[in-house]
Image: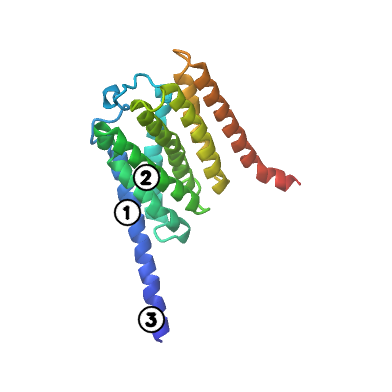
């Protein structure tokens, strides 16, 4: 009898913990989405925030690329709401919730930090990236539209954004030139995205988003033309898209055989 009671208590405890994590994701997702509305927003670091002013740095994507944030905010909130209403205690959703909540919670305070300090903004955005990447890798296989896809887009954009922030910090302190920093960011984004994608090959939305950011860098370097940066970013985007297509077509090839 005691063993039965212990198992029942354990089951209730597990259920309560899953409910709390689900609620935490919902709260942090709402706080994250509301952060631009509760602040002055973020249009990039100001040139005067760096010892070497970063005026039109080549590592920053063209402005249109940042429109992905509207989709990210809506989809992350919608996914959190779906999980809260439909998958509150679902084991398939459980593993990704704490790292996602960590990332979103840090993201909710990122804008005011970035307005005050590029250094601490860089530290925090890497924490956001680590949480998002962990959430994507540990996400379940069910409810792709509401679980994996929004997290993959979020982690993909953070892959590019965290490297942009880091290389702006390096160039802004005069440790490397702006073009060298941009080239280093592109190469790092390519290899980092390739590594993460291997950990979760069933979620190509991740590399598509990284490729979107790289295309944004291409467009941002057409006028004035920075051929070296634009070419490398374009090549990286093409290779990532080809890799994504191979991943997407692989199950069909296996079935065909």
Q: Position of residue 65 (x, y in %)?
A: 43, 27
The label shown at residue 5 is 3
Q: Earlier in the sequence, mark 2 or mark 3?
A: 3
Residue ID at (39%, 85%):
2
Q: Secondary structure at mark 2?
A: helix
Task: Give the mark nearer the N terminus: 1 vs 2.
Answer: 1
Q: State the image quarter where residue 194 is shown.
A: top right
Measured in 3D between alpha carbons, the distance from the residue under mark 1 to the one under mark 2, in whole angstroms, is: 17 Å
In space, the residues marked 2 and 3 are separated at their CA atoms by 40 Å
Which secondary structure, mark 1? helix
Q: Which residue is mark 2?
A: 127
Label 2 Cα neighbours within 10 Å, binned few <14 / some 14-19 / many ≥20: some
Element on which disc 3 rests: helix
Image x and y of residue 154, in percent: 43, 40
Residue for point 48% across, 47% down: 148
State the colouring used for the structure image: rainbow
For marks 3 and 1, the one nearer the N-term is: 3
What separation in Å lies between label 3 and label 1 (alpha carbons)? 28 Å
> Which residue is outermost to the top?
224
Q: Disc 1 vs disc 2: which is toward the camera?
A: 2
Name the mark nearer the viewer: 2 or 3.
2
Residues at circles 3 and 1 in contact by the CB criterion of under 8 Å: no
Residue ID at (31%, 35%): 119
Image disc number at residue 146: none
61 and 16: which one is in front?
61
Q: Quadrant of the N terminus?
A: bottom left
Q: Tell me whether circle 1 and circle 2 mark residues in contact (CB < 8 Å).
A: no
- Does residue 118 appear left or right of residue 61 in this picture? left
- For label 1, the residue is 24
Question: Residue 184: image x %, image y %?
Answer: 48, 30
Q: Quadrant of residue 104?
A: top left
């Amino acid at each position: 009898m005691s063993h039965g009671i212990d198992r029942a208590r354990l089951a209730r405890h597990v259920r309560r913990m899953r409910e709390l994590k689900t609620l935490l994701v919902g709260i942090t997702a709402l706080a994250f989405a509301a952060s631009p509305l509760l602040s002055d927003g973020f249009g990039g670091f100001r040139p005067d925030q760096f010892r070497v002013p970063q005026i039109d740095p080549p590592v920053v994507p063209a402005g249109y690329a940042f429109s992905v944030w509207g989709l990210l905010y809506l989809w992350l909130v919608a996914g959190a709401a779906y999980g809260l209403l439909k998958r509150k205690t679902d084991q398939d959703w459980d593993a990704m919730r704490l790292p996602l909540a960590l990332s979103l919670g840090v993201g909710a305070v990122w804008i005011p930090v970035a307005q005050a300090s590029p250094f601490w903004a860089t530290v925090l955005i890497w924490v956001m990236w680590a949480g998002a990447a962990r959430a994507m890798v540990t996400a379940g296989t069910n409810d792709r539209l509401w679980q994996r896809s929004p997290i993959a887009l979020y982690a993909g954009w953070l892959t590019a954004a965290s490297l942009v922030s880091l290389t702006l910090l390096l160039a802004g302190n005069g440790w490397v030139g702006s073009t060298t920093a941009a080239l280093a960011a592109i190469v790092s984004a390519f290899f980092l995205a390739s590594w993460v994608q291997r950990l979760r090959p069933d979620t190509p939305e991740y590399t598509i988003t990284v490729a979107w950011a790289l295309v944004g860098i291409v467009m941002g370097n057409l006028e004035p033309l920075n051929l070296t940066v634009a070419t490398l970013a374009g090549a990286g985007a093409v290779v990532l898209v080809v890799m994504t297509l191979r991943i997407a077509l692989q199950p069909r090839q296996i079935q065909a055989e």
